Every structure is written in C-alpha cells, then in structure tokens.
C-alpha cells in the first residue's frame, strides 16, 4: 500500500470510528449514565476523536501476527493489548484536557479505583469488552470496508470532505476551549464540559430562548463569557451545598 493510500485509509478509519463512537456515547449517556440525550464529546458535530484513534489502532493491531500455537491465547493477547491501549488513550486525552485546557470531558472520580477521575477499573473493563467485540465481530467487516475503500479511491473525496468539516469543527471547538481555559485559570476551577452544556440549555429553557439545542449546545442568546459566569456561580453553589452536608 502506498504512503498516500495509507494516510487515506487512516483518515477513513478515523472518521468512521469517531462517528460510530459518538453514536455509542449518545446512547450510553441516554440509557446508562446521564439518563438524558446529551451531545457528547469536545466537538459540536458527531465526532469523538478518541474512538477514531481507537478504531485505527485496533485495526492496525489485528494486522500484527500473534502466533502462540493456541488460537484462544492469541485472541486473549490481542484483546488485552487493545483494551490496555484504549485505556492509555483515554488517560492521555483526559490528562491533556484537564491539565492543559482546564476542561473535564468525563469524570470517574466516584468510581472505585479511579486515577485522577480520568480512568478506572470499571471503564477499563468496558474497553476490554469493546476490544473483544471488535476482535470477534467487527474486525472482518472493517477489513472488508478498508479493502473496498482501497479499490474505490474515488470515495476518498467524500472522506476528505467530511474530514474538512471535522477540522472546521475542531477549530471552532479549540477557540471555545481557549476562552474556557482563560476563564478557568482566572477562577481557579476545572470546567466540566457537559455541565456547562446543561447550564446553557437550562438558561435557554428558563427564558424560553430557542438557541441551545442538542446539535448546537453552546449556541446562546447571551455572550459566552456570561454563560461561563453563570456556570461558575451554579458550580460554586452546588459545591457549598455539598460541604454543608
């Protein structure tokens, strides 16, 4: 495979993984964690890059031959490597956002054995289940999809188009993150991304403003700085209530 073809395949897997991961997170939050419809992740559009990197790397790992002489052991080794890799990716991503941007995209601090609220045994186990599902169910269809993509490179135009939209979304989200980071450093707090989305949505509903929505959670009639101030006041109030208890 040529170098350019390899880059296009990586972009293809990244976009597919990011979008599938976004769908998975939407339903996970709706039925298991938050119990409500939430636009998850850092970006506005239907992408979660962590899953994009995950799919690309899991696919690459399945291409590496593991031969112990025992098929069940081969499968176990590959699944453990993929599960561990996803936990590492999750930890690095969480650390970058919390330490570098003062933004908390998820919070496992209430889970047993968590490390800095970024990773925990429960979700590492869930990553193992995802890895097992990929190995036994998805690896073959993904391989066929990659082969089809390589044989139909004209489709690369659409991948490039979607990737372009993704980059625009990324630029917009990074611009927001700069404002959030500046505000968080000034107030010495870490901003919980989903709580901020909820704060904006609640204000819009309270004053019957048709701005905040599932697709555009940060769109508001107020200035973004005002939304951050409102979020901070609410967060401090909740923190004081917990201290009283």
Image (tube, rainbow, N blue to C red):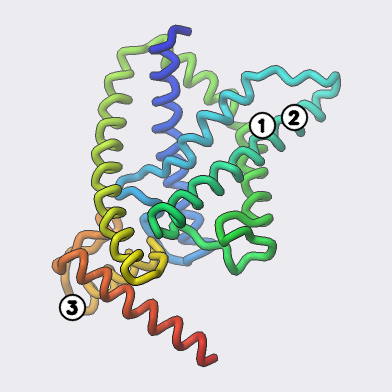
SS at circle 2: helix
**Callout 2: 10 Å neighbours few (<14), some, many (20+)?**
some
Q: Marks 2 and 3, how far apart in space?
A: 55 Å
Vertical placement of 160 versus 114: above or below?
A: above
- Percent across and percent down for residue 140 are 59, 23
Sequence order check, earlier mark of 2 and 3: 2
- Residue depicted at x 81% and y 29%: 73
Quickly name the residue at label 3. Answer: 207
- Residue depicted at x 68% and y 65%: 112
- Percent across and percent down for residue 133 are 63, 38
> Between 240 and 84, which is closer to the camera in this rendering?
240
SS at circle 1: helix
Quickly name the residue at label 2. Answer: 75
Disc 2 to disc 3: CB gap under 8 Å: no
* Count of all numbered marks drawn on residues in the image: 3
Disc 1 to disc 2: CB gap under 8 Å: yes
Instruction: Tell whether 17 sits left or right of 206.
Output: right
Q: Marks 1 and 2, how far apart in space?
A: 9 Å
Vertical placement of 52 versus 101: above or below?
A: above
Q: Marks 3 and 1, how far apart in space?
A: 50 Å
- Residue depicted at x 38% and y 68%: 195
**Callout 1: 10 Å neighbours few (<14), some, many (20+)?**
few
The residue positioned farthest toward the bottom in the image shown = 244
Q: Report the mark closest to the observer, 3 or 1.
A: 3
> Between 105 and 68, which is closer to the camera in this rendering?
105
The image quadrant that residue 163 belongs to is top left
> Between 167 and 125, which is closer to the camera in this rendering?
167
Sequence order check, earlier mark of 3 and 1: 1
SS at circle 3: loop
Instruction: Tell whether 226 sits left or right of 37.
Output: left
């Amino acid at each position: 495979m040529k170098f350019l073809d390899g880059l296009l395949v990586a972009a293809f897997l990244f976009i597919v993984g990011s979008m599938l991961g976004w769908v998975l997170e939407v339903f996970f939050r709706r039925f298991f964690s938050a119990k409500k419809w939430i636009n998850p992740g850092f970006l506005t559009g239907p992408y979660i890059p962590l899953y994009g990197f995950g799919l690309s790397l899991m696919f690459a790992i399945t291409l590496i031959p593991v031969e112990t002489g025992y098929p069940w052991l081969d499968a176990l080794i590959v699944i453990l490597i993929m599960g561990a890799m996803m936990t590492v990716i999750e930890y690095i991503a969480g650390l970058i956002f919390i330490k570098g941007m003062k933004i908390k995209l998820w919070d496992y601090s209430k889970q047993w054995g968590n490390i800095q609220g970024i990773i925990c045994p429960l979700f590492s186990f869930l990553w193992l289940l995802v890895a097992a599902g990929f190995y036994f169910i998805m690896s073959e269809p993904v391989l066929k999809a990659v082969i089809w993509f390589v044989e139909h490179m004209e489709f690369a135009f659409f991948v490039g188009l979607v990737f372009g939209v993704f980059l625009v979304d990324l630029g917009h989200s990074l611009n927001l993150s700069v404002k959030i980071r500046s505000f968080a450093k000034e107030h010495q707090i870490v901003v919980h991304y989903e709580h901020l989305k909820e704060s904006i949505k609640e204000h819009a509903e309270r004053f019957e403003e048709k701005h905040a929505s599932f697709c555009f959670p940060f769109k508001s009639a107020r200035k973004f700085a005002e939304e951050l101030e409102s979020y901070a006041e609410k967060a401090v109030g909740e923190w004081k209530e917990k201290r009283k208890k």
